[in-house]
C-alpha cells in the first residue's frame, strides 16, 4: 500500500500525505456508496410497489392473502432504530435513577478499565526501554527498569482481578433489577395465567425468568467490558503512536489508512466466514428450556407416571393420549390420517389399510342398518367382495349389537343417529 501511494505521488507530482488523503477519500466514498445503494434501492422498490398497489387493488388483496414466508418473516436482529429503542427501555430498568448501586459499580468498573489501559501503555513503553538498555549494554539502567516493571506488575494483577470482580458485581446488580421487574410484570393482572394457558408465544416462561435473565445480565456486563477496554486501547494507543511518529518527523496518515483498510478487510472476512452465532445461541436456549420443561412435568406427575408405568412405551403397547382442550390431541390424528398436511419434519405411519380412525362424533348415513355396517361400501360392493348378511351378523355378534337386528331388522330404514342416542 505504501509503495502504491509513493508510485502514485511520483506519477502525478503529489506529496505522500496528499496521496494518502486522496486514497482515504476514495475508500470513504466507496464505502458510502456500498452502504447507501441498498437503502436507495429499497426506497425505490417501495415506491414502485405503492404505484402498483394503487393501480391493481385486486392484486394487492391477493398478495395479502397469499403472503409467503419470505415476506412475512420477522426481520433479523441488528443495530437499528428498534435496537436503540429497546436499549433505552432497558436503561430505564437497569438504572431507574442517576444515583443507584448499579451506577456506583459501573463507575468503579470504568475506572478499573481505564487504569488497565494506562497500565498497558506504560508497560509497553517500559518494555521498549528495557530492550533499549539491553541493546545499549547498560546494566544499571536495565536493573532500574526491571525493578519498575516488577513494581508495576503487582498493581496490574490487582487491577485485572478487580475488573473481573466488578464485572460480576455489575452483572449481579443487573440481574436483580431485571428479575424484580420481570416478576412484578409476570404476577400482575394474572399475566402468568394468560402466558401459560392462553398465549403460546412464550413456550417456557420459567426458562425466560431464570436462566435467560441470568445469561442476559452476564452478557450485558461482559459486553461493556469487551467494548470499553478495546475502544480505550485503540484511542490511547493510536494517540501515543501518532505522537511518537510526529515527534520523529514521520507522517501518520499512510500507516493509519493502511491499518484501517486491514481492520475493515479483516472484519468483512470474519463476518462472511463466521456462522450465525445468534441463531445457534437461541436454538441452544430453546432446547435447554424445553428439556427443563419436560423434566418439570415429570416431577409434577411422577406418581401418575409410575402408576401407569409410563416410563417406557414399546411397540404393540396401548397408549392413552390425554390433555386439556386445545392441546392438539385431535390435531395429531388429523395429521396421521392425512387430513392435514405435514409442513415440516418427517412422519412415519403404517399403511392406511392397517389403521382405522374413529372420529369423535359418530356419522350415520342415510339408509338401512346394513348400510351403516358396510359404510362406506354399498350393497353391490359388499357382494363383489364376497361378503353376505351372515358375515354382518357375525360382526354384530362380536360387538354385542345383534339384538338391534332382531328388534329392528337389517333392511329397515331409520334415523339411526337418533336411535343410537336413545340407546
Image (cartoon, grey):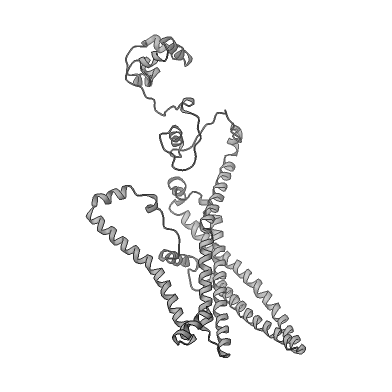
* Residue that protrudes farthest toward the right in the picture: 139
Q: Where residue 334 appears, x then y in whole percent?
A: 43, 34
Instruction: Report the label total.
Output: 0
Which quadrant of the figure has residue 35?
Answer: bottom left
* Residue that protrudes farthest toward the front in the picture: 11
Q: From the viewer's side, name the closer residue of 259 and 81.
A: 259
Q: Is residue 313 left or right of residue 135?
A: left
Q: From the viewer's side, name the closer residue of 109 and 138.
A: 138
Q: Where residue 286 appears, x then y in whole percent?
A: 53, 51
Q: From the viewer's side, name the closer residue of 332 and 216.
A: 332
* Residue that protrudes farthest toward the left in the picture: 55
Q: Report whether residue 15 is seen.
A: yes
Q: From the viewer's side, name the closer residue of 420 and 142.
A: 142
- Position of residue 178 relative to residue 289, above or below, is below
Q: Where residue 161 appears, x then y in whole percent?
A: 66, 71
The residue located at (53%, 52%) in the rendering is 283
Q: Report whether residue 423 is seen.
A: no
The residue located at (54%, 75%) in the rendering is 231
The residue located at (77%, 89%) in the rendering is 140
Which quadrant of the figure has residue 171?
Answer: bottom right
Q: Where residue 232 appears, x then y in whole percent?
A: 55, 77
- Position of residue 21 relative to residue 284, above or below, is below
The quadrant of the picture occupied by the C terminus is top left
Amino acid at each position: 500500500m505504501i509503495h502504491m501511494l509513493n508510485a502514485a505521488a511520483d506519477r502525478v507530482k503529489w506529496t505522500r500525505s496528499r496521496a494518502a488523503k486522496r486514497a482515504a477519500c476514495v475508500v470513504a466514498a466507496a464505502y458510502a456508496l456500498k452502504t447507501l445503494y441498498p437503502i436507495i434501492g429499497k426506497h425505490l422498490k417501495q415506491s414502485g410497489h405503492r404505484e402498483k398497489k394503487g393501480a391493481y387493488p385486486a392484486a394487492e388483496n391477493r398478495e395479502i392473502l397469499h403472503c409467503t414466508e419470505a415476506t412475512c418473516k420477522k426481520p433479523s436482529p441488528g443495530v437499528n432504530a428498534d435496537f436503540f429503542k429497546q436499549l433505552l427501555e432497558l436503561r430505564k430498568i437497569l438504572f431507574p435513577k442517576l444515583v443507584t448501586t448499579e451506577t456506583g459499580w459501573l463507575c468503579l468498573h470504568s475506572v478499573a478499565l481505564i487504569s488497565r489501559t494506562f497500565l498497558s501503555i506504560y508497560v509497553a513503553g517500559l518494555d521498549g526501554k528495557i530492550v533499549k538498555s539491553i541493546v545499549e549494554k547498560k546494566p544499571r539502567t536495565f536493573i532500574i527498569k526491571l525493578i519498575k516493571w516488577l513494581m508495576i506488575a503487582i498493581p496490574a494483577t490487582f487491577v485485572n482481578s478487580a475488573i473481573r470482580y466488578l464485572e460480576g458485581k455489575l452483572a449481579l446488580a443487573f440481574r436483580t433489577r431485571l428479575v424484580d421487574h420481570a416478576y412484578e410484570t409476570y404476577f400482575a393482572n394474572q399475566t402468568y395465567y394468560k402466558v401459560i394457558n392462553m398465549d403460546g408465544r412464550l413456550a417456557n416462561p420459567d426458562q425466560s425468568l431464570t436462566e435467560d435473565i441470568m445469561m442476559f445480565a452476564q452478557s450485558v456486563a461482559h459486553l461493556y467490558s469487551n467494548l470499553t477496554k478495546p475502544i480505550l486501547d485503540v484511542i490511547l494507543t493510536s494517540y501515543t503512536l501518532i505522537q511518537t511518529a510526529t515527534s520523529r518527523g514521520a507522517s501518520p496518515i499512510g500507516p493509519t489508512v493502511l491499518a484501517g483498510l486491514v481492520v475493515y478487510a479483516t472484519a468483512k472476512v470474519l463476518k462472511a466466514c463466521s456462522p450465525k452465532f445468534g441463531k445457534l445461541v437461541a436454538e441452544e436456549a430453546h432446547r435447554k428450556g424445553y428439556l427443563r420443561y419436560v423434566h418439570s412435568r415429570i416431577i409434577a406427575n411422577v406418581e401418575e407416571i409410575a402408576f401407569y408405568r409410563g416410563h417406557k412405551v414399546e411397540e404393540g403397547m396401548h397408549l392413552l393420549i390425554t390433555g386439556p382442550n386445545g392441546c392438539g390431541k385431535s390435531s395429531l390424528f388429523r395429521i396421521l390420517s392425512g387430513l392435514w398436511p405435514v409442513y415440516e419434519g418427517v412422519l412415519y405411519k403404517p399403511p392406511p389399510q392397517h389403521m382405522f380412525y374413529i372420529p369423535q362424533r359418530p356419522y350415520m348415513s342415510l339408509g338401512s342398518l346394513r348400510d351403516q355396517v358396510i359404510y362406506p361400501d354399498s350393497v353391490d360392493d359388499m357382494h363383489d367382495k364376497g361378503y353376505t348378511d351372515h358375515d354382518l351378523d357375525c360382526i354384530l355378534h362380536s360387538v354385542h349389537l345383534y339384538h338391534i337386528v332382531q328388534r329392528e331388522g337389517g333392511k329397515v330404514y331409520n334415523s339411526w343417529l337418533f336411535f343410537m342416542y336413545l340407546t
